[in-house]
Image: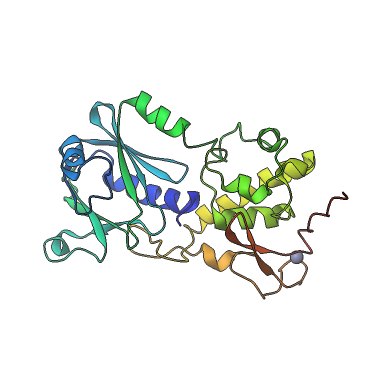
Amino acid sequence: MPELPEVETIRGQLAPLVEGRRLQRIEILDARWSRPLAPAELEGALGGRRIERLGRRGKYLVWSFSDDVHLAQHLRMTGAVLCVPAAQEASADPPHTRVRLRLGAARGRAAVGLAIVDPRRFGTGELLLGTEALESFFAARLGLEPFDERFTGEHLRALARGRTAPIKALLLDQRRIAGVGNIYADEALFRAGIHPLRPAGSLSVDQHARLREGVIAALSAGIDARGATIDDFRHVDGVRGSFQDEFRVHRRAGEPCGVCGSTIVKMVVAGRGTYVCETCQPRPRRRRR
Ligand SMILES: [Zn+2]
């Protein structure tokens, strides 16, 4: 699933292409994408509007249109946004196209087509009318962004206080921390030297500070590598991200740890396949009864 660095990569590539253009037409080919709105309702609300800004919140792409109209797009498991050259547009959609967008010419740039493709069809687009609706949508769904200056070791510690669930589950909880998924949780915990099964509330002040650094370092490395492609994630031009080549533990079971040489192991934590070096990330001790 695309996580913060993958969505940020798409945003960075798309923003200069779409901002300032008019969305001439949006065609929703799969009614699941716009639920609970019917495709025609969403098409009518967005068609003809100018795209003012393309933003990101957590794993959402946020399209902001004229008159304070917004679209919160989630790529879920396998969604991607692809640029479709005008010559190709009429002939054939890319495989698994769920939504077609047609953007008008602007400042000497030709009109352009985009396709939202999604083999597994879990992606969604949600219409939000007004800044207030936008803010309350995200307030109910997302915690702080890790790049927010308020995201400190102290903040993490406050989130974790009294919690006995594994620290990895906390990292994955979008309502507490926005944008971290399975890849970056594993990589952040490894960088911080913390076992994913550690009860969140049991970490020391120093460990929370290291974990905050680990989260930011892992996400930054992912953004620098323009995301990771392990399933269907692709850039706007169809190119794949390269961060999978830099994973330190994720998907590396059986390989030696780059720090200590121990064998990386796979286990299930918070219902997700999880990769750990149990030398660099010591297993929590069992409590005496
Ligand atoms: Zn190690």
> Residue 14 placed where, x, y %?
33, 49
Image quadrant in which you'd find residue 122: bottom left
- Left or right: where does residue 166 sit relative to residue 133? right
Q: Across the whole image, how many numbered discs are drawn on residues?
A: 0
> Residue 40 placed where, x, y %?
15, 42
Q: Which of 131 and 226 is in front in this view?
A: 131
- Asked if residue 49 is positioned above or below residue 276 in the image, the reply reads above
Q: Which residue is rendered at x = 75% and y = 55% of the image?
A: 193
Q: In the orientation shown, which residue stands out farthest toward the bottom?
A: 254
- Left or right: where does residue 95 sit relative to residue 120? left
Q: Which residue is rendered at x = 78% and y = 42% of the image?
A: 206
Name the image quarter holding the N terminus. Answer: bottom left
Q: In the orientation shown, which residue stands out farthest toward the top?
A: 132
- Left or right: where does residue 139 sit relative to residue 149? left
> Residue 112 placed where, x, y %?
19, 52
Q: Which residue is rendered at x = 72% and y = 35% of the image?
A: 161
> Residue 198 placed where, x, y %?
74, 51
Q: Nearer the viewer, residue 68 or 111?
A: 68
Q: Nearer the viewer, residue 41 or 156?
A: 41
